[in-house]
Image (cartoon, rainbow, N blue to C red):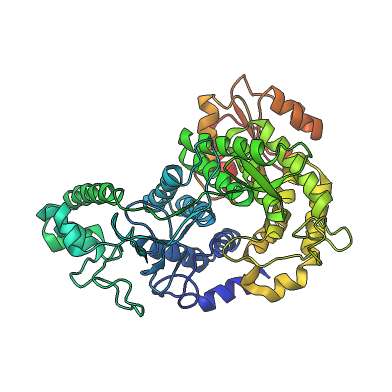
């Protein structure tokens, strides 16, 4: 099944522009998730390179907001040049993780920069004052403060005259060369004549090419471009903004909690952990703390409503597991387990395996469906199967693995026949086919030695692992109540110690980061 999906993606791959298939092109991060894991499993370099090329070309195109960060919904052309300008929370969450994984795979700072800019955009423009994350920004906005007519992309596009009126000669020369600015506009295919005379910013030339073209040093060009971006971004803030869809959806917030938690692991910025934690607290308070005990799907303006579906549970559980592995606050692992148990009771098809999309309590829904297609978002089933696999490794509970394996078996024929259509379900299959490493650190989260160990772990792409902290306190007591082995783990010579295990059978513990490096490389 894994090989068939890889070859299907290979057949569709656009080796010039990246992505899969022809226009319109959607990001579809689930395919990138699969390709990175296929590369990790097989060493097949072309799987890695397809994902990296796609991420690189997307970040260079008009699909990416070159001034403010964040991705638009999809590209209307094969070159990622002309987007549908809507920005969706679920894209930002998944793509932030894709760029973080690309950075782990390559250590190329360009991928790190894009991830950071996505998260900066979400923090600035899509974050509720009390925590959670809003859903989207519209594609259209008014052309000016005086205009009564909205236009696609009006907030984001520029005429050459506008650019030159705000930048000095050197800045304009560098900016226009870098971003492909033309007097007549740079949109070649414009059937509706929406972008006449307008320029959509794309990284048309590299910084080095710009330096050669305008006869400046590379560092000098970088400074000119940074000043130009700041000036144009400030000018753009004065424009009428696209409408904000200020719903807080539980499922998409779960994805975004994952992104911020994973960003803290990889990049180490405390603000990322704080964003993930605050969002988790917000949705717990507003969508999970109801008098009748129900989990709700949507919050807006003080009102929570609509019964939660499978993706709400599964995406949130994934976010809480990632938040635990980032913060080691045991409450997040406990809540993830509680929600998983509840999800199994409400949604599991006890006879065949797999999870229904709805609870069955709403009489107006005549058929309870089980969805597996991984499109712009992963299916609820893909994440609902992967989460118990992770929990079984963390808590040594065979019940979770049995649920996951029965569900994979139920969808077995679909997985084989579906090729890349079930890309995220293949990620769960990949995890189930491996013996994940259990990396167990004994010590305090604030200990500098623990931080160095975690930095060593997160510096590499290790998709088949779980991470646990034995802290001598509430966290260790909870873990030991599930797996007595955890109660016996102690520091070596009172120094932070790491155990690298499989099925709770561990290599010799070490307090040496170099030895940890060797163990992780095995």
Indicate left or right for 448 with 307 as reference: left
Q: Vertically, is 27 above or below 389?
A: below
Indicate left or right for 461 with 142 as reference: right
Which quadrant of the rendered structure holds the N terminus? bottom right
Could you tell me which residue is drawn at 44 percent across and 66 percent down?
54
Q: Foreground: 115 or 443?
A: 115
Could you tell me which residue is drawn at 54 percent across and 60 percent down?
36
Q: How many marks?
A: 0
Indicate left or right for 31 with 338 as reference: left
- In the rendered image, the residue lying farthest to the right is 351
Residue 26: x and y, percent? 49, 68
Q: Foreground: 426 or 378?
A: 378
Could you tell me which residue is drawn at 58 percent across and 59 percent down?
37
For residue 262, what is the image quadrant?
top right
Q: Vertically, is 460 above or below 165?
A: above
Residue 136: x and y, percent? 49, 54
Indicate left or right for 274 with 373 as reference: left
- In the rendered image, the residue lying farthest to the top is 494
């Amino acid at each position: 099944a894994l090989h068939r999906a890889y070859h299907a993606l290979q057949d569709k791959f656009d080796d010039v522009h990246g992505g899969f298939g022809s226009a319109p092109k959607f990001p579809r991060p689930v395919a990138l998730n699969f390709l990175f894991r296929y590369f990790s499993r097989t060493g097949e370099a072309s799987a890695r390179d397809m994902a990296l090329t796609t991420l690189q070309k997307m970040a260079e195109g008009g699909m990416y907001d070159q001034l403010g960060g964040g991705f638009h919904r999809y590209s209307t052309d094969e070159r990622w040049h002309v987007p549908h300008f809507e920005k969706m929370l679920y894209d930002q969450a998944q793509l932030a993780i894709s760029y973080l994984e690309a950075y782990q795979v390559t250590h190329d700072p360009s991928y790190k920069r894009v991830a950071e800019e996505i998260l900066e955009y979400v923090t600035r423009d899509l974050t509720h004052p009390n925590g959670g994350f809003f859903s989207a920004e519209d594609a259209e906005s008014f052309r000016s403060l005086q205009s009564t007519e909205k236009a696609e992309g009006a907030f984001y596009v520029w005429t050459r005259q506008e650019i030159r009126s705000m930048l000095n000669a050197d800045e304009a020369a560098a900016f226009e060369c870098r971003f492909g600015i033309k007097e007549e506009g740079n949109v070649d295919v414009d059937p509706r004549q929406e972008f006449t005379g307008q320029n959509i910013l794309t990284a048309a030339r590299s910084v080095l090419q710009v330096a050669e073209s305008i006869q400046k040093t590379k560092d000098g060009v970088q400074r000119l471009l940074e000043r130009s971006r700041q000036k144009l971004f400030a000018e753009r803030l004065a424009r009428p903004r696209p409408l904000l869809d200020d719903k807080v959806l539980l499922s998409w917030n779960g994805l975004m909690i994952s992104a911020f938690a994973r960003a803290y692991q990889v990049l180490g910025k405390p603000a990322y952990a704080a964003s993930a934690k605050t969002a988790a607290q917000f949705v717990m308070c507003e969508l999970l703390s109801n008098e009748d005990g129900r989990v709700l799907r949507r919050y807006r303006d003080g009102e929570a409503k609509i019964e939660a579906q499978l993706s709400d549970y599964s995406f949130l559980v994934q976010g809480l597991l990632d938040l635990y592995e980032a913060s080691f606050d045991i409450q997040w692992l406990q809540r993830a387990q509680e929600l998983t148990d509840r999800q199994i009771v409400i949604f599991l098809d006890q006879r065949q395996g797999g999870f229904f999309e709805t609870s069955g309590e709403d009489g107006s829904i005549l058929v309870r469906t089980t969805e597996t297609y991984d499109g712009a978002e992963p299916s609820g089933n893909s994440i609902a199967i992967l989460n118990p696999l992770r929990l079984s490794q963390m808590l040594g509970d065979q019940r979770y693995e049995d649920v996951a394996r029965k569900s994979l078996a139920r969808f077995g024929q679909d997985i084989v026949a579906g090729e890349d259509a079930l890309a995220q379900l293949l990620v769960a299959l990949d995890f189930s086919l491996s013996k994940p490493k259990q990396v167990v650190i004994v010590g305090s989260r604030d200990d500098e030695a623990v931080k160095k160990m975690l930095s060593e772990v997160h510096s590499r792409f290790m998709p088949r692992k779980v991470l646990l902290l034995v802290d001598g306190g509430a966290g260790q007591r909870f873990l030991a109540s599930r797996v007595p082995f955890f109660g016996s783990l102690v520091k070596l010579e009172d120094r932070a110690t790491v155990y690298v295990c499989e099925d709770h059978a561990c290599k010799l513990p070490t307090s040496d980061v170099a030895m940890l490096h060797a163990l992780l490389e095995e």
